[in-house]
Image (spheres, helix red, strand yellow):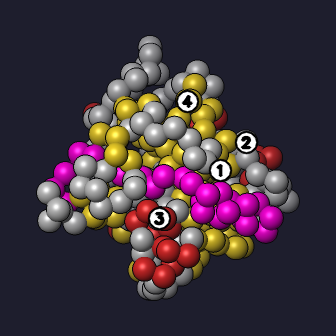
Amino acid sequence: MAHALPIDLLGPLKQALGETTATRRTQGARPASVPEAATSSARWAAGGAVARTTGRVFLTMDGSDFVCSASALRSANRDVVVTAGHCVKNGSGAWAENWTFVPGYDVGRKPYGTFLARRMFVAGPWSRIGDDNYDVAMVAVAPSGGRHLTDRVGGQGIGFNVRRGQRTFGFGFPADPPYDGEHLVYCAGGAHDDPHALTQDQGVRCDLTAGSSGGPWLSAFDASTGQGTVTSVSSFKYSDDHGTMYGPYFGDTIKELFDSAQRA
């Protein structure tokens, strides 16, 4: 298994703007109940806070346009967004430009406006060598329409050094088929350690595709309110297992990253 290579889930913008009917199979009325295990992702139709706080990210990296996913967090400055490191900086390479967060995105609609990055933060090991253990970014966004981000949409909590192996809900805007990036999609299940032992990341069985990078992983999630605690973000899949999503563990380094962003 050690031959497997990690592949990230950054989505080229052209993929997100292509097929518009790909998610038809997941559309429908609000589910009677939200399954605790949903390895085959489904459109999130239950509303609540997560539908407002999760959004799409549009960015330019090395001259190409990409899409990612991200989440608004409760923070001191009311302006912090969490996403994947590779949605902000290409490892030791270029920083993203034109970075724009659209909370509550749905089929092109931007009900809460758009929020532009004013300061971006990544961990040292990601910036130096692209270490997947630290594929996390915090972005302090500028107010939009004179209002702070979480004054508009609310925010999720964030947890550090939490117990591993918890039941987790992962959210994002996958853009590769069978999805088109136009709806919030989720999967859910128990987190487990990386079987390749190449990272300290945890994995969840989940078929989200490119464009879902940076989407929040929520533990202690209440489906009736859409509130939970962000304990990771979607980062990568291994080349020999496209059915498992991996996300970095939020330890002390990620807490420092968050603290820097909320002071910005």
Q: Is residue 244 left or right of residue 81?
A: left
The region drawn magenta spans 239-264
- For the point 37% across and 32% down, which residue is it? 189
Quadrant of the drawing holding the N terminus? bottom left
Distance of label 2 from label 1 (alpha carbons): 7 Å
Percent position of residue 194, x then y: 31, 50
Q: Report the mark closest to the observer, 4 or 2.
A: 4
Foreground tag (3 vs 1): 3
- The type of residue carrying mark 4 is Phe
Classify 10 Å Cα crowding around label 1: few (below 14), some (14-19), many (20 and above).
many
Task: Name which quarter of the figure residue 185 lies in.
Answer: top left
Residue 6 % position (x, y): 27, 64
Amino acid at pointer 2: Gly
Establish if 140 lies above or below 69: below
What residue do we see at 80% from left, 46% from top?
A: 151
Which residue corresponds to mark 4? 221
N-terminal of the pair, mark 4 or mark 2, is: 2
Q: Name the foreground residue: 218 vs 126.
A: 126
Residue that label 2 marks: 154
Gap between marks 2 and 3, in whole Å? 24 Å
Residue highlighted by disc 3 = 135
